[in-house]
Amino acid sequence: MELKFGDRVLMKKAHPCGGSEFIIERVGMDFKLKCVKCGHVVMLPRLKAEKGIKKIIE
C-alpha cells in the first residue's frame, strides 16, 4: 500500500470520539495517526494500520 506523510485515510474501525478519518503524521515501522475530529494521536504498528485502512481520501 502506497501511504505517505499527510495522507488522509478512512479507517474500518472508528475512534471512540466517533471519527473514522485520520491524518498520517509518521510513516515507518509504526504509523502515527491523528484523528481529524478530536486531534488525538494514535501509534499503530505498520501491519495493523495497513489492515485497518479502508481507503485513502487524499
Image: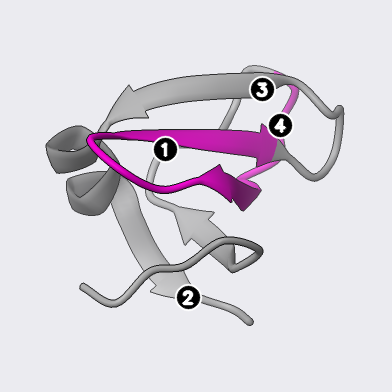
Which residue is label 3 attached to? Answer: 41
Using the rendered view, name the quadrant where residue 17 is placed: top right
**Mark-to-mark CA distance, 3 and 1:** 15 Å
**Mark-to-mark CA distance, 4 and 2:** 18 Å
Quick one: which residue is furthest to the bottom in this view? 58
**Mark-to-mark CA distance, 2 and 3:** 18 Å
Amino acid type at image mark 3: Val
Q: Which of 57 and 3 is in front in this view?
A: 3
Amino acid type at image mark 4: Gly
Relative image position of residue 16 (x, y in whole percent)? 63, 17
* Label 3 close to label 1 by CB (< 8 Å): no
The C terminus - image quarter = bottom right
Secondary structure of the residue carrying numbered label 2: strand
Relative placement, left or right, of 3 versus 26 is: left
Which residue is label 4 attached to? Answer: 18
Q: In this view, does 49 lie above or below 42?
A: below
Task: Assess disc 4: are there few (<14), some (14-19) or many (≥20) residues with their C-alpha within 10 Å of its C-alpha.
Answer: few
Which residue is label 1 attached to? Answer: 13
Amino acid type at image mark 2: Ile
Relative image position of residue 46 (x, y in whole percent)? 22, 39
Secondary structure of the residue carrying numbered label 4: loop
Which residue is label 2 attached to? Answer: 56
Q: Does the magenta stretch include residue 14?
A: no
| Among numbered discs 1 and 4, the one appearing first in the sequence | 1
Relative placement, left or right, of 25 versus 45 is: right
